[in-house]
Image (cartoon, rainbow, N blue to C red):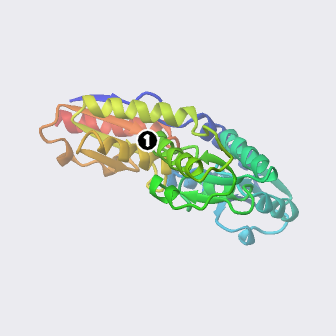
Amino acid sequence: MKVYVAEGSGFCFGVKRAMDMAFKYAVKNRGKKVYSLHEIIHNPQEVVRLEKAGARHVEKISSIEKGAAAIISTHGVTGLEQDRLKEKCGGVLDTTCPYVKKIHNIVKKLADENYQVIIAGDADHLEVKSILGYAGEGAVVVASAREASKLKLREKVGVVSQTTNNMAMYIEVLGEVQKKAFVSRYSEVRAFNTICDATKNRQAATLELAKKVDVLIIVGGKNSANTKRLYELGKTVLPWVYHVETASEIKKAWFAGKKAAGVSAGASTPEKGIIDAVKRIKMIGEN
C-alpha cells in the first residue's frame, strides 16, 4: 500500500515555539512548583509529556499556588487573566502564539476606536476566549454565515477570524456582514485576514491529498480545532476519512480494498505521531 503524507503536517511555528519555551522553563525551574494554565497545546499526549517534565496542568488560576511559576498556553489568555497571574505568581512564561497576539492587538485597537468587533470562530475555544478579552463591549463570536446574518451591527464594525479557521467559512461570514452593512447603510466595515499561513497551507494540502488517495487518516488531538477542520475538509472530498489521536487507534478494516492511503496532521501533532501512523498503515498493508 502506498502511503502519502500531506505537506506541512505536524507542529506549526507557534506550537513548536511554545513547546520549546515550556519545556526549557519547566527544566529550568525543576524542584519548584510550575503550573501550565490550560493545555499548552490541544494534544493530550504532549500535555502529559510536559507534566512529566515538571509543569502541572490546571484549568483555573485559583488552582495555582501563590508564588509558584505559571505557563500561559499557546492559545493565550485575556488581559485580566494575565494581570491576575502576574500578581499571584513568582514568574510567568507567556507562550501565546505571535499570530494570536497580533489579533489581540488588532481587536484592542478596534475597540479603542469604538468599532464593534466580530470574531469568526468557535466561542468555546481558548484562543477565541482570549481574543474576546481584548475586543471591548459589544464584541460577538459567530460560527457561521447564518449566525452572522442575524447580528445587529453598529455603525463601525471590525471583523477578525480565529487563526485556525476554515477560509471558506470566514469569507462567507464576511459576505454576510458586508451585506448587512451595505443594506442598512452602515458607514464602515474593516476586515482582517487573521487565519495563519500554516493553517491555510495545511488545509489546501489535505484537500489535494484527499483527491488522490482511497483512505485518509487525520492525526491529532480530538479537542484540537485545526485538526477537526482537516477531518471536516477531507470528508468533503472522500468518504473514508478517520480522525485518530494515536497510531494505536488505526484499524485494519479501514484499508480493506484500498491501494493508497494518506496521512495529514494538525498543528499540535508531534512528528512522532505522524511517523507512528505511517508505520502502522504500512504494517497493515504488508499483512
Residue appearing at x 46%, y 34% in the figure: 202
- The x and y percentages for residue 145 are 47, 52
- The x and y percentages for residue 243 are 35, 49
Q: Looking at the image, is 108 positioned above or below residue 60?
A: above
The residue wearing badge 1 is 273
Residue appearing at x 85%, y 64% in the figure: 67
- The x and y percentages for residue 100 are 67, 44
Q: Nearer the viewer, residue 147 or 55?
A: 147
- Can residue 172 be seen here? The reply is yes
Q: Amino acid at mark 1?
A: Gly
- Can residue 32 be seen here? The reply is no
Circle 1 — which element?
helix
Q: Name, please, the residue furthest toward the left.
A: 257
Q: Quadrant of residue 264?
A: top left
Assess disc 1: are there few (<14), some (14-19) or many (≥20) residues with their C-alpha within 10 Å of its C-alpha: some
Q: Nearer the viewer, residue 50 or 231?
A: 231
User: Which quadrant is home to the C terminus?
Assistant: top left
Residue appearing at x 45%, y 41% in the figure: 168
